[in-house]
Image (spheres, helix red, strand yellow):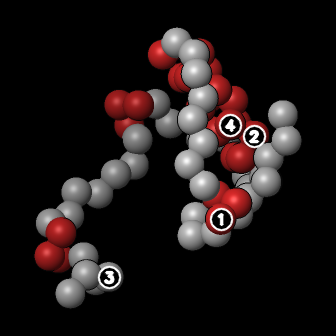
Amino acid sequence: MTVRIVPLTSQEAGEVRIGGSAAEMVAIVARLSELLWARTHQPLPTYTRATIPVAIVALGARPDRD
């Protein structure tokens, strides 16, 4: 599989639809996630789903929002 990163606003990004079952699509997303994470040259996170680092912030309290 070849991966090419393009801006979402570019014509190349276009809408791409793939077929397959839900399980096949989840497998594709998992594989793409692995490949793209590898491009960051960072180790995979080791935290569990229960301990995933998150912050719950009201939308109006975000510094990047008006």
Rendered image: mark on residue 32: 4
CA–CA distance in space, label 2 to label 1: 23 Å
Q: Residue at x 17, y 76 (%)?
A: 61
Mark 2 or mark 1: which comes first in sequence?
1
Q: Height in image: 4 above or below 45?
A: below
Rendered image: mark on residue 11: 1
In this rendering, would 43 be left or right of 26? right
Disc number lying in front (3 or 4)? 4
In this rendering, would 13 be left or right of 5? left
Q: Residue at x 57, y 16 (%)?
A: 20
Mark 2 or mark 3: which comes first in sequence?
2
In this rendering, would 63 be left or right of 13? left
Query: Does the CB distance between marks 2 and 4 fall below 8 Å?
Result: yes
CA–CA distance in space, label 4 to label 1: 21 Å
Q: Residues within 10 Å of mark 2 (few under 14, many from 20)?
A: few
CA–CA distance in space, label 3 to label 1: 28 Å
Rendered image: mark on residue 64: 3
Question: How many discs appear?
Answer: 4
Q: Residues within 10 Å of mark 4 (few under 14, many from 20)?
A: some
* Identity, as a three-letter code, of the amino acid under mark 1: Gln
Q: Residue at x 71, y 47 (%)?
A: 36
> Residue 18 location, x and y as percent?
60, 29
